[in-house]
Structures are given as C-alpha cells and as structure tokens.
Image (cartoon, rainbow, N blue to C red):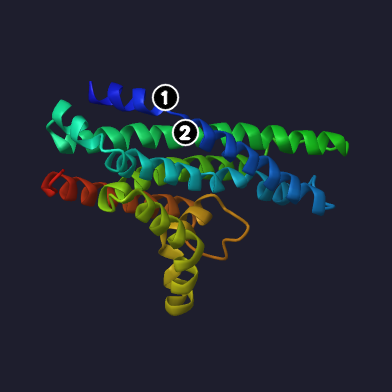
Amino acid sequence: MIVRAEVRKLLTTRTPLLLFAAAQLLVVAGISGVMAERDDIAATETQRAAVSHTGLVSLFALVLGVMAVAGEYRHRTISDTYLTAPDRARVVLAKLGVYSIAGLFFGVAAAVTALAAAAIWLTARDESLAITSGDLWQTIAGGILWNALFGAIGVGVGALITNLMGALAAALAWVALVEGIVAQLVGDAADWLPFALGSALDTLPTATGGPPQWLAGLALAGYAVVFAAAAILTTVRRDVV
C-alpha cells in the first residue's frame, strides 16, 4: 500500500517528467560536446568519455530523491502521509525503495540516450560504436548504479533537511562547491567523498585516481545506507505540524 502510494505520487506529478527530460538533454549536449571536439572518436576511451555522461544524470536523481521527502513538508502533505501510514520508518523505507528504482530508471534511460547519441555521431563520421568493449559497458553500468544510489541519498537528505529549498541548496552546493574545497584541505581523502566516488564508479574522465570501480560502488552504497539510517532515525523522532 505504502509503495503503491509513493509510485502514484511519482507518476502523477510533472516534476519527475521535467527532470527526466532535462536529463536526456544533458546527456545529448554532453556527448555532442565530446564528439565535436575530438578527432579520435573511434577510440574506446573517447566513447567511454562520451557515455560517462550517464552518471552525471545522478544529479537529477538526487534532486528527485530530495523532493520525495522535503517536497511533502513544503506542500504540507506529509501529515496526510503519516496519518495514512503511521509507521514512519516504513514510509521512509518505501520512499528509499521507490526513488532508488526511479534513479535506476533515470540511469538506464540516460544510458540508452547516450548510446544512441554516440552512435549517431559515429555513424556521421563513418565510424561505429565499440559495443564489444567491456570497458564501455563497465562505464555505463557504473553510471546507472550511481543514479540509483544518488536517488537513495537524495531521500536521506530530504528527510534530514525538511526545508525543500534548504535541502536542494545543501545537496547541490556540496556537489558543485564543497567537495572541491574539502579536496584542497584533505588531499587524497577527498576521493572517498560521495561525488568523487560516483565519478570513480562511472569512470568519469574528471575523476583523477581514486578507488577502483567496484570499491567506489561499495563505498557509495555505504553512504546511501548511512543516509537511509539517519533519515529513519530522524523521521521517527520528529514532530510533524
């Protein structure tokens, strides 16, 4: 029942659709930028750099996860949600599950868009997509997982910071600004921060060093678990007006 309610909320509002459309545009624009400026587009590394934009869509999955909880506080529908399902821990778990899957869907759709866009660029130059390359598919798989995990982390952030604007500002500022500042202060330890781990998981070209892909995935999953646990503990103790 709780899961069905969350799915209904997800599918009957415009915001997820707008985020989904914007994500596809980001992927196409990013791949076009890579393909337009490179002469070696047939090289596997260039194609990996192009399809790694799948992982950047995780920012939209993060926003969607934040809005899943903080958005209800903003629109004052959270009280109705808890009246319908008094077990708040189950509500948070349902949101975590639904929005992790939504993030997974964002990642898969972005991967399809990335492959299609890359194939079009390659065909236009009489080249072909390196579909037999394990490294290419490894990059895509990492990007998809990054989306799913950031969807879960977004739910955690939204539950911890129930003010929607504050939660979105905190999440996006961390990605765009704070990790960069922290990296200058702590050096290699910054490779274990969430966005850096996502970059390593996706093998994003901007990722310099960091843990291997499998370890980055485990570490980022650890962040998702920590945020989920904090969200549940905070939510069951919080007063709702």
The answer to the question of whether label 2 and label 1 lie on touching residues, with beta carbons closer than 8 A, is yes
User: Relative to residue 232, is residue 139 drawn left or right?
Assistant: right
Query: Residue 76's spot in the image, x, y percent?
Result: 26, 38
Disc 2: CA contacts within 10 A as few (<14), some (14-19) or many (>=20) = many
- In the rendered image of this protein, does residue 157 appear above or below residue 193? above
Which three-letter amino acid code belongs to the residue tagged 2? Answer: Pro
User: Relative to residue 54, is residue 164 drawn left or right?
Assistant: left
Q: Quick check: can you spot residue 43?
A: no
Residue at image coords 40%, 42%: 151
Quadrant of the frame with the C terminus: top left
Quadrant of the frame with the N terminus: top left
Residue at image coords 23%, 36%: 78
**Secondary structure at numbered mark 1:** helix
Q: Based on the displayed image, in which of its 4 quarters is residue 119 positioned?
A: top right
Q: Based on the displayed image, in which of its 4 quarters is residue 113 positioned?
A: top right
Tell me which label, 2 or 1, sits earlier in the chain. Answer: 1
Residue at image coords 43%, 46%: 62
Cα–Cα span, label 2 and label 1: 8 Å
Q: Nearer the viewer, residue 24 or 228?
A: 24
Residue at image coords 57%, 41%: 140
Seen from this angle, which residue lies furthest bottom?
Answer: 185
The disc at residue 11 is 1
Query: Residue 144's spot in the image, x, y percent?
Result: 50, 40
Q: Nearer the viewer, residue 184 or 204?
A: 184
The disc at residue 16 is 2
Query: Residue 55's spot in the image, x, y percent?
Result: 54, 46
Disc 1: CA contacts within 10 A as few (<14), some (14-19) or many (>=20) = few
- In the rendered image of this protein, does residue 34 appear above or below residue 185? above
**Secondary structure at numbered mark 2:** helix
Which three-letter amino acid code belongs to the residue tagged 1? Answer: Leu
